[in-house]
Amino acid sequence: MITYNVGKAKLQIVRGDITDQETDAIVNAANSTLMGGGGVDGAIHRKGGPKILEECKKIRLTLYPEGLPTGKAVITSGGNMKTKYVIHTVGPIWRGGNSGEAELLSEAYKNSLKLAVSRRLKTISFPSISTGAYGFPIEKASKIALESIKNFLESEDGLELIVCVLFSQSDLETYVKVAKEIFS
Ligand code: ADP
């Protein structure tokens, strides 16, 4: 684990499973249907139980009948997990890098953080959005993730702890290397 002070908050980079995190919120790398899927999304719905899907269905019926657009974020309870809330965001599918992927990935982080602050949450955990099924190269994605978090924490108060949770050792090593470049 590695920790940096950023603005008034701490940023931690850890290896682990997002569904085990005890932060106020965990972020789901969802797809626009909000109806579940593989990877992080599947793990969250499996462990969180059916309540989360019920809340997602309500969000679809009320706020986003056509699905949650890429880069936007919504919030549900955390169901049976230790976290109180799940913030669902949709990262971009990697299409080679010239289709606004970087901007959309940054929006997914920024809008998740904004939503957490608007609910007065203090602690939040992120998986590596878009770097699984959506194919975003991990080194590029980690730079965008860490820079988006840094920019947000330097301009907005309220959050105390942000945890980047990496599932594999090699993803963890990439994040640690890129964080060194950004933060020191
Ligand atoms: P996306 O569709 O946005 O690419 P994925 O869920 O397919 O999202 O993958 C995002 C990243 O999360 C990948 O690096 C994947 O290895 C990782 N991952 C998968 N399951 C978990 C989990 N339970 N906790 C944390 N990270 C996970």
Image (cartoon, rainbow, N blue to C red):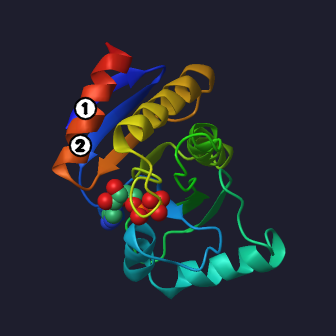
Q: Is residue 102 left or right of residue 169?
A: right
Quadrant for the C terminus in the image: top left
Q: Is residue 169 above or below residue 76?
A: above
Residue type beneath disc 1? Val
Quadrant for the N terminus in the image: top left
Question: Residue at 59% across / 57% down in the picture?
Answer: 89
- Determine contact: label 2, label 1, CB under 8 Å: yes
Question: Residue at 29% across / 38% down in the picture?
Answer: 13
Q: Depth check: 128 or 87 in front?
A: 128
x, y percentage for residue 132?
39, 59
x, y percentage for residue 119?
65, 50
User: Which image quarter has ligand 1?
Assistant: bottom left
- The label on residue 13 is none
Residue type beneath disc 2? Leu
List the residue tagged with mark 2: 172
Q: Is residue 117 above or below residue 19?
A: above
Q: Is residue 114 left or right of residue 11?
A: right
Question: Residue at 52% across / 52% down in the picture?
Answer: 94
x, y percentage for residue 69?
72, 59
Count of labels in the image: 2
Question: Residue at 51% across / 87% down in the picture?
Answer: 50
The local secondary structure at tag 1 comes to helix
Q: CA distance from mark 2 to mark 1?
A: 6 Å
List the residue tagged with mark 1: 176
Residue 35 seen in this snapshot: yes
